Amino acid sequence: MNVVVQNTERADPEVIKGLGECGVATVHEAQGRKGLLAAHMRPIYTGVRLGASAVTISAPPCDNWMLHVAIEQIKPGDILVLAPTSPSNSGYFGDLIATSAQAHGCVGLIIDAGVRDISDLTEMNFPVWSKAIFAQGTVKETIGSVNVPVVCANELVNPGDVIVADDDGVCVVRREEAADVLEKAHAREANEAEKRARLKSGELGLDIYDMRQKLADKGLKYV
Amino acid sequence: MNVVVQNTERADPEVIKGLGECGVATVHEAQGRKGLLAAHMRPIYTGVRLGASAVTISAPPCDNWMLHVAIEQIKPGDILVLAPTSPSNSGYFGDLIATSAQAHGCVGLIIDAGVRDISDLTEMNFPVWSKAIFAQGTVKETIGSVNVPVVCANELVNPGDVIVADDDGVCVVRREEAADVLEKAHAREANEAEKRARLKSGELGLDIYDMRQKLADKGLKYV
Amino acid sequence: MNVVVQNTERADPEVIKGLGECGVATVHEAQGRKGLLAAHMRPIYTGVRLGASAVTISAPPCDNWMLHVAIEQIKPGDILVLAPTSPSNSGYFGDLIATSAQAHGCVGLIIDAGVRDISDLTEMNFPVWSKAIFAQGTVKETIGSVNVPVVCANELVNPGDVIVADDDGVCVVRREEAADVLEKAHAREANEAEKRARLKSGELGLDIYDMRQKLADKGLKYV
Amino acid sequence: MNVVVQNTERADPEVIKGLGECGVATVHEAQGRKGLLAAHMRPIYTGVRLGASAVTISAPPCDNWMLHVAIEQIKPGDILVLAPTSPSNSGYFGDLIATSAQAHGCVGLIIDAGVRDISDLTEMNFPVWSKAIFAQGTVKETIGSVNVPVVCANELVNPGDVIVADDDGVCVVRREEAADVLEKAHAREANEAEKRARLKSGELGLDIYDMRQKLADKGLKYV
Amino acid sequence: MNVVVQNTERADPEVIKGLGECGVATVHEAQGRKGLLAAHMRPIYTGVRLGASAVTISAPPCDNWMLHVAIEQIKPGDILVLAPTSPSNSGYFGDLIATSAQAHGCVGLIIDAGVRDISDLTEMNFPVWSKAIFAQGTVKETIGSVNVPVVCANELVNPGDVIVADDDGVCVVRREEAADVLEKAHAREANEAEKRARLKSGELGLDIYDMRQKLADKGLKYV
Amino acid sequence: MNVVVQNTERADPEVIKGLGECGVATVHEAQGRKGLLAAHMRPIYTGVRLGASAVTISAPPCDNWMLHVAIEQIKPGDILVLAPTSPSNSGYFGDLIATSAQAHGCVGLIIDAGVRDISDLTEMNFPVWSKAIFAQGTVKETIGSVNVPVVCANELVNPGDVIVADDDGVCVVRREEAADVLEKAHAREANEAEKRARLKSGELGLDIYDMRQKLADKGLKYV
């Protein structure tokens, strides 16, 4: 029942990097407005934008044992994604485990629970998106699983899915859809660049998107 | 039923500017402790203090169509104030619409819902006070109204009311009371400057405000 | 019933300083994982780490009168700890009272309610950990007590207890346990330094802590 | 600034009664999907459905003095609507004030704060819709206003507006629109009765509302 | 992208019924403490215990169009499970749609959003577990999907999975594990019956479960 | 560090019973408006009013081992009071443990966490006031303490303190103050009976409490 799945597949590193550069809002739209983790997932410091491959952890509430297990499964460029099996704010993760994860090439953590030592993590350039900042210690008594599908912050994440995270929050892209989503995201960016220029010049969205007649048809009145 | 009210009145620009300089706490006190939007309205970045004239938007939940309609009604120095008709965290507003709003002189956004592209907005110096940061996309299917009275974050805002916003949150001042409130805010600032000097020198509020007898009368005992 | 307790005892200043330097997570662990205030207590600005002696305030909801009473009881190096008797977000504390408190040597405020003028407080280097940032004014009508035991953010704080606060939140240490906790915190730091070096070199926690057999015994399977 | 407005107008009693019989969901739809108070407003006991004329109270946080003032303004069939000027869970209202209000013909209370003595209130058949059930006592130190417009649970309520409340929550109808809304609510009920019969017989909404083509046009696929 | 999956498989009706009779807590334990929907999912009335086969709905926020589509897919004994793609409290479901669903054999609704007409639904014996009770109307503008995997209240639900719901909340059992889980649940019930009798007679859990030595080993002291 | 304190003192059973009959609101007022547990503590079923002596439990998050330890310390008329050391919604308590507790004379449970099997508990007439209803299972891995002071729902509870609980929530009375508080509560009830009669006859609180002049002095205007 409790397993560690080894040798999971990852998406193409170039695709992962590309998705990270596009950012959460663009990727979310490009894949049909899906994949966002809940809005309570906030970065411990701002200014990071990344794409990474998920190593998932299903952990008991207030028990961080499986983090040590998961680190052995990390390959450079991976990100840890931890979902507790019952809601918890406890501080599963701090600077010691971060040191270990970073030594193995881990680029960050997504955790639907608490994190601590955030000033150390900030100095280490180890970004975390979490539900809470809380120093509450955890135990190492009960096992969970690594690299199984988890629901994290109301969204399904499979091992090897691509995580995109920035100041807006966190978005997951299915591994097998990643290349296709990147293509759509690039198309979206190209389209937006042209729109941005027109909007910056003062042209109205009402005219660019040809909305006036539709609004009138819906019954909007100017008074 | 769904209308866009054009040519609404605005307060005197000097009064609006003066209120902005006084800041939220002072203005709130000066007008008799009223007008504060709920504490969940937080800035996406700190360090801004502004006064601006409200262009109001009553929008359906998770539908940002009316933002495009509202931008046409903006005059330089205005701020958009969006209240959804049902609670929503969706990201109604991002860098593209901000580009359009800024091109028309809009100085910011107050939204009792979500916002996205916050790193872009920060770079653009486009401040937003919101309930949530969330990349969730919205639709453009249902109309609302522009420049009608709205209840935003538990406070009534009329078009043309003055919005004061800073790191403490957001306060609304009725357009017709704005000049009077500014005068009271200035009086309050003058009074506080004198108090601040005395308190800084170590004099106690207990003595400055003559509280010792009143506290004893209420029954306070020193032990 | 409503009292101001004068001349409360404080811990040794060197111990207080030492605990502050260890920080919240370490101190919390060193004293057996107790003493953390609730996770909703967040700093108004980041980057501060302090230890200080508590001057406690039991205040009525939305009434800040007792803050003025408490300031007279401050000695240099103290921190104010305010617990309302009923939940409140109101802004009990702003730049004027902070000026007074700072003039008497107060190094900060812990408040399970609201604070305002946070940009001024940031400029003054006066740190606050609070439940809310909210400009809502308070009254001075009802008395409370100073330097009595209070429950603040779900944790008991006695006058003279040591408060440790940083970006992770707030922890309280009993005055009479402070020296002992400091010793344990230093031992913990020494131990962590060695672990950090090994983890940084890539050694796994699984091996350092000898976990592999215990995990197998609990039933963990690698697949 | 703090006033008691006497002799406010009320809607036609037959209209008020009719709106109450239609219930919250129907009235809310009939008036164009507006007027709902926030979803946190819940009844202390279920099974009540009423329409009543609002006597509004703007009260300081944790201070119930104005309730006594408001009761003098009650006419039989009125309902009290209390909005605190800052968020509060305190128990403003209990069985003693309810006894007084009921003696003057008051049919209930809408309060965006706390209520207590709920088993007594249930026995008295005095319904309350509130944000919280909490026994926390209040003071009588600061005045507010009676029969002024208030924002209660994120919705504007004017004195004399019609309140409709049932197990679904609370809805407000503007006094001057009440007769018109009742007419539309009755039309809606008539229409729904016919629909309900068809749906009960097993006919599908897809067919009754002729949705199949529209869904296909939007791109819905059956697989 | 938006699909209606027809002819999904269901578990054996006897197994579904058996799981319903065991109830949420027993089934949750029997399947290894997994499958619980978040604690905010509460019944609109108490006293129901059921097992049913899930017809899932992925719906846009504040848009209930897909409910009509889903009803056509219902077979007797099914339950609707609706997950909005962005958080919403709106009242997607009321007595009219319930009439239609019930006519097709639907035994209830699980919805991570709002429901309305709850007194009618109670009279109809149509149980609902929801995040909110709220009369807010929805639109029919944007399509979603029916009978695709959804994350509802932080838990994955596939079409044809078994839903167990009672006063404790909601639990999901994978269709392919249902028979096995039922067997384990029955074993658990048998074991509990024996334990219950011993506990009722006054025997202590400390002795029945042989805990005294383990507690002493962990360091528990009696004083 | 982890202890079970045996043979704690209890208040006089007649005093405990008397306090229970007075109820939460009266007792809270009688002791100077203190002692209320947070408003999130709600009964799993309504209609109970009780007084009982506290057996306290400090338990790790999501670990219910100490409940079994505590039951051995129960004497007839006691109530269990469980405070987790870190926030948790998990279902620490269900019908099996309730059977054991009830067999030893326990009259209920106060828990700042989750409870499950609530329909069974209701049938057993075993009342619980909790933060959550949630079936999430707990473990038995980490020890805590029994009959030590705990902070439960933001309020300090000592072993042997008197718990008063009813539909309004939960209040704690210090053991050593219990007799005095009961006397004051009875005085309050006597006074309220007279007031209730006058209010029921239609006399106004404004007159009974002689408020008119004070309101005018504060500046209240009738218009």
Image (cartoon, coloured by chain):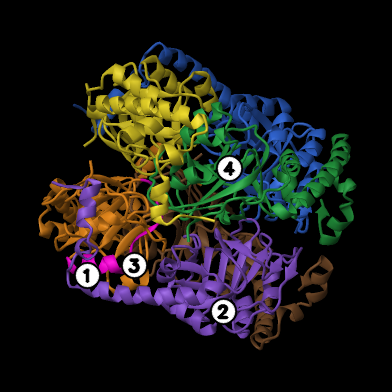
Chain colours: A blue, B yellow, C green, D orange, E brown, F purple
Q: CA distance from mark 4 to mark 2?
A: 38 Å
- Can you give x and y, in whole percent of width and height, for residue E62 in the image? 39, 45
Same chain assignment for discs 1 and 3: no
Q: Secondary structure at mark 2?
A: loop
Q: Amino acid at mark 1?
A: Leu
Q: Write down the residue under mark 1.
A: F199
Q: Secondary structure at mark 1?
A: helix
Q: Which mark is residue F11?
A: 2
Same chain assignment for discs 1 and 2: yes
What segment carries the magenta color?
D86-104
Q: Write down the residue under mark 3.
A: D46
Q: CA distance from mark 1 to mark 2?
A: 36 Å
Pointer 1 chain: F
Looking at the image, is mark 1 or mark 2 earlier in the sequence? 2
Which numbered mark, 1 or 2, is in the foreground of this view?
2
- Can you give x and y, in whole percent of width and height, for residue B162 in the image? 31, 27
Q: Residue E64 or B91: which is nearer the viewer?
A: B91
User: Badges 1 and 3: C-beta atoms under 8 Å apart?
Assistant: no
Q: Amino acid at mark 2?
A: Ala
Q: CA distance from mark 1 to mark 3?
A: 26 Å
Task: Examine the rendered structure and indicate whether residue F214 appears above or below residue C167.
Answer: below
Q: Amino acid at mark 4?
A: Ile
| Residue located at (26% from left, 35% from top) | B149
Q: CA distance from mark 3 to mark 4?
A: 52 Å
Rate crowding at label 4 as few (under 14), some (14 to 19) or many (20 or more) other CA atoms within 10 Å: many
Q: Write down the residue under mark 4.
A: C74
Pointer 3 chain: D
Q: Which mark is residue F150?
A: none
